[in-house]
């Protein structure tokens, strides 16, 4: 069985709660530390794709809005402002380590059209060959349904499949998947490894309604299911944990690991 540390092509997804303070303003220390680790992982010979949320949240912060707009044009406007700020910061931070970033904004219709999907795959492939770090988000400013129903956990699994990644790391605001909600039950235990995503795992994650308060675990589990079905291992871990990516790449027990890597060449080739 291959180990997490053997993964060559890695997709890292980072959520709004990891990237911003409660005020909606950027968490600069968190972003700097994330970029430093990603740049170093890249220096070690691995390929990195970053799926970053935060456009709407950062846009709100920058526009001085105290509440998330409820109407679609309001969210679209925030995303347009915030995406720009996010890319500015990623460009600046990665440049510190001599790495080049690129912006890739996707909508569901692109992925559903075989020709457009292939175009995106070719573009990812070329960017990675060129040593560039693609920074991916939904194109929230034009994508109405994406804003209403989309989530970047699903997007990260789609991207992991598009680029034929070996590993998807979903960074969130709790340690990983617990057997019950750790914010309600003091005796909740972290599940270190999941071999198969079954009913027990889905119910540990809670349903969409209750899971929103626990870092949206339900969408992370369905993302894990999509990725592992294509033989891609998935880790859900705490983005605020010191050196989280270094520890993972060194094979330390961090977060919840969903097996997938060992199956990569084992015939689970659907939609890869
Ligand atoms: N695309 C959204 C944003 O950048 C985030 C969606 C999500 O966090 O799932 O604000």
Image (cartoon, grey):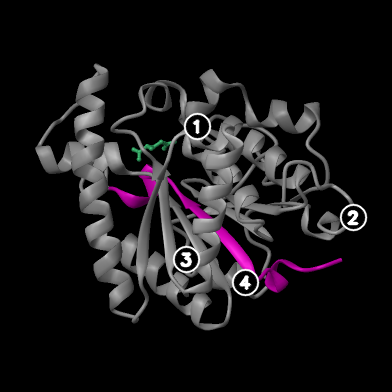
Asked if the residue at tag 3 contacts the one at tag 2, i.e. Cβ–Cβ closer than 8 Å, the answer is no
Which residue, given by chain and number where applicable, does mark 4 sit on? 249
For the point 24% across and 16% down, the residue is 71
* Mark closer to the observer (4, 1): 1
Q: Earlier in the sequence, mark 4 or mark 3?
A: 3
In the picture, measured across the screen, residue 59 lies left or right of residue 227, that is left
Residue 226's tag is none
Residue 127's tag is 3
Q: CA distance from mark 2 to mark 1?
A: 28 Å
Q: CA distance from mark 2 to mark 3?
A: 28 Å
Query: x%, y% of residue 172?
Result: 49, 47
- Which residue range is magenta in the image? 1-20
* Mark closer to the observer (4, 3): 3
Residue 66 visible in the shown view = yes
Sort mark 3 into few (<14), some (14-19) or many (20+) by Cα contacts within 10 Å.
some
Q: Earlier in the sequence, mark 1 or mark 3?
A: 1
The image shows residue 173, relative to residue 89, as above or below, that is above
- In the picture as drawn, the residue positioned furthest to the right comes out as 266
């Amino acid at each position: 069985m291959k180990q997490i540390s053997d993964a060559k092509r890695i997709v890292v997804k980072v959520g709004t709660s990891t990237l911003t303070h409660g005020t909606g303003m950027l968490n600069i220390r968190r972003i700097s530390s994330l970029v430093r680790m990603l740049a170093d992982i890249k220096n070690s010979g691995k390929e990195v794709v970053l799926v970053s949320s935060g456009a709407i949240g950062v846009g709100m912060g920058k526009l001085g809005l105290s509440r998330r707009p409820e109407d679609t044009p309001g969210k679209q406007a925030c995303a347009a402002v915030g995406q720009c700020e996010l890319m500015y910061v990623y460009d600046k931070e990665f440049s510190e380590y001599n790495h080049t970033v690129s912006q890739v904004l996707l909508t569901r219709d692109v992925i559903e059209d075989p020709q457009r999907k292939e175009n995106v795959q070719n573009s990812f492939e070329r960017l990675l060959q060129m040593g560039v770090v693609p920074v991916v988000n939904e194109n929230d400013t034009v994508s109405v349904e994406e804003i209403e129903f989309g989530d970047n956990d699903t997007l990260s699994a789609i991207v992991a499949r598009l680029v034929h990644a070996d590993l998807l790391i979903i960074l969130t605001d709790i340690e990983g998947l617990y057997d019950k909600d750790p914010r309600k039950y003091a005796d909740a235990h972290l599940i270190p490894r999941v071999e198969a995503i079954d009913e027990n795992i889905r119910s540990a994650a809670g349903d969409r309604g209750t899971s929103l308060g626990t870092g949206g675990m339900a969408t992370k589990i369905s993302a894990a299911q999509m990725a592992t079905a294509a033989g891609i291992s998935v880790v859900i871990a705490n983005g605020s944990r010191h050196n989280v990516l270094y520890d993972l790449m060194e094979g330390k027990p961090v977060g919840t690991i969903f097996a997938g890597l060992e199956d990569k060449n084992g015939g689970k080739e659907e939609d890869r």
